[in-house]
Image (tube, rainbow, N blue to C red):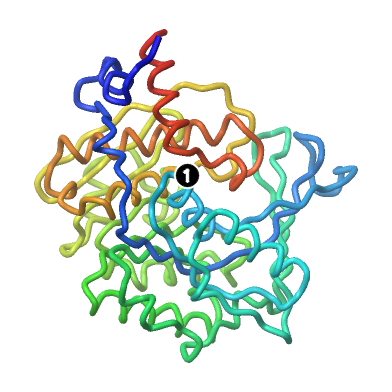
Amino acid sequence: MQHSANQMANSYSGNSNHISKEDAKETSSLVVSFGELLIDFVPTVGGVSLAEAPAFQKAPGGAPANVAVGISRLGGSSAFVGKVGADEFGYMLANILKENNVDMSGMRFDPNARTALAFVTLRADGEREFLFFRNPSADMLLHESELDINLLKKARVFHYGSISLIDEPCKSAHLAAMRIASNSGSILSYDPNLRLALWPSAEAARKGIMSIWDQADVIKISEEEITFLTGGDDPYDDNVVLTKLFHPNLKLLIVTEGSSGCRYYTKEFRGKVGGVKVKPVDTTGAGDAFVGGFLYNLASDPSILQDEKQLRKALYFANVCGAITVTERGAIPAMPTKDAILQFLLESASI
């Protein structure tokens, strides 16, 4: 029996979250992602510490690059700006972006530094353990003079994290790229993506992350990041979020709650969009898939920031992107296509 995309989406029961094919339309609106691209080494067995791991499997990593691939998989237009080593791993990562139709014109290769490596595991106690090799790695060495200014000027949305703020010269390149994009009318999107192990201290991380806070138009944070940035406050308290983290220029603050969904705050309205229940296999990249799904919709139609009904649709779409990603191993391999999203909606509606 044939179902149209509209029927698929509209058969979903939550009225305020209906997604139709028009809502998931192709877009030529460019999202430029800035930051790190690296190799993750993940144990071949789950629930062990790095020391206990019998062997490791390599996988592409780096939140901004994951977001760029996520957008492209959905049929959106995305570009990545960052630096890798002129080495086998750097070329491998470049090929993965190319295979996923991500514009690489802003990517640079450093002949004198290696591509960053990260060993990451989810221990039996549920804690993530990281070990980074960046002494310094190529991503830290992107210079302002290497920025593709024309590419940055084309961005409808310019997306970034905080890892690129830790060291010079990348920090200056990051700030310059934000300036260029903002002056060209881009929406600035910020996902701090806290990685405490990379910062000199917790205080340096808090200060660095907050140093560009008031420049973003859209910020996505997790519950753990709220607790960290506020010095231990309750992440579920709306007053904490609004008084300590919502700045006057902010158009949208999103708080992700994993499988429980997300909360949203604007000057005009706030609310919660429920999560999607799936059987998790690997949570790596779920947050990046969420961001990719949301920015895909935002770049297509920036007016969703003023329209609560359309915003809720976009956030539900993002929740589905994150949910599908956790059902497979790896971040980039698990990023969903638009067809996978519509298929998921159809199956959800028929349950």
Q: Which residue is mark 1?
A: 289
Q: Nearer the viewer, residue 256 or 13?
A: 13
Circle 1 residues within 10 Å: few <14, some 14–19, many ≥20: many
**Amino acid at the residue labelled 1:** Ala
> Circle 1 — which element?
helix
Percent of width and height locating residue 173: 46, 83
Percent of width and height locating residue 89: 74, 66
Q: Nearer the viewer, residue 233 or 337?
A: 337
Residue at image location 60% in from the left, 78% down from the top: 140
Q: Quadrant of the N terminus?
A: top left
Q: Is residue 162 left or right of residue 60?
A: left
Residue at image location 83% in from the left, 48% down from the top: 56
Percent of width and height locating residue 9: 30, 23
The answer to whether 159 is drawn above or below residue 223 in the figure is below
Q: Quadrant of the C terminus?
A: top left
Percent of width and height locating residue 63: 53, 56
**Count of numbered circles on the image:** 1
